Amino acid sequence: MMEGVRRGYTLLVLYVMKTIERLGTELALGILEEAAEEQGVLIADEMRRTLPEGLTPLETGAEVYGRFMADAGSEVSVHKKDGASVTFLIRRCPFYEAFLDVGVDCGYFLNGLCNNLTLPSIQATLKQFDPRLRVESVLTRRAAEEFCLERVVLSEA
């Protein structure tokens, strides 16, 4: 299954790259953000049916993030947890592998790609549960044998 998921993301990344070439970065990423917002509503509606009751907003955010990434084909686990945030360790990631498939092999570019292509979809989903929930990249892998760290936080504002 991982191979099929990776191939799907590879197609998406190639499509976004071609769209950026034709429309420009700002317009293409704006359209992607609109699509991510719509996807966030759909995913949240689906997840609401199976989330445990009685979770705090941060616990809900962590559960949603973990499910989102696992459903996407990632190997994800809790790395660190405190009252203000939950940090996840991501080892195997089909998003990362899709970026490699299209020739993006440097952590310098990958961080920007993750922030523009994958995190907006997760953020849009989290927002459906609580607008104060945020996902942020803490560490982006630079090589296949490394890992990423991403944190879910409940902001005060």
Image (cartoon, rainbow, N blue to C red):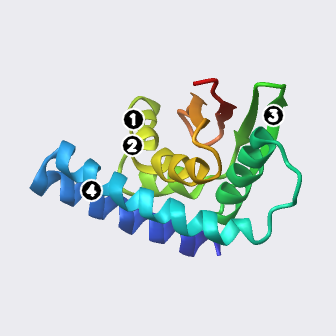
Residue type, mark 3 in image: His
Disc number placed over residue 75 in the picture, else none: none
Cα gap from disc 3 to disc 2, whole angstroms = 23 Å
Disc number placed over residue 112 in the picture, else none: 1
Cα gap from disc 1 to disc 3, whole angstroms = 22 Å
Quarter of the image where the N terminus is located? bottom right
Q: Earlier in the sequence, mark 4 or mark 2?
A: 4
Measured as percent of width and height from the top left, residue 153 is found at 67, 31
Q: Nearer the viewer, mark 4 or mark 1?
A: 4
Task: Describe the element under mark 4 as helix, strand or loop.
Answer: helix
Q: Nearer the viewer, mark 4 or mark 2?
A: 4
Q: Which residue is mark 3?
A: 79
Q: Which residue is mark 4?
A: 31
Residue type, mark 4 in image: Ile
Residue type, mark 2 in image: Asn
Quarter of the image where the C terminus is located? top right
- The relative height of residue 56 versus residue 28 in the rendered view (above or below) is above
Q: Are marks 3 and 4 in contact (CB under 8 Å)?
A: no
Q: Are marks 1 and 2 in contact (CB under 8 Å)?
A: yes
Residue situated in front as seen by the camera: 83 or 91: 83
Measured as percent of width and height from the top left, residue 47 is found at 70, 66
Tag 3: Cα neighbours inside 10 Å, few (<14), some, or many (≥20)? few
Disc number placed over residue 116 in the picture, else none: 2
Tag 1: Cα neighbours inside 10 Å, few (<14), some, or many (≥20)? few
Residue type, mark 1 in image: Gly
146 lies left or right of 52: left
Tag 2: Cα neighbours inside 10 Å, few (<14), some, or many (≥20)? some
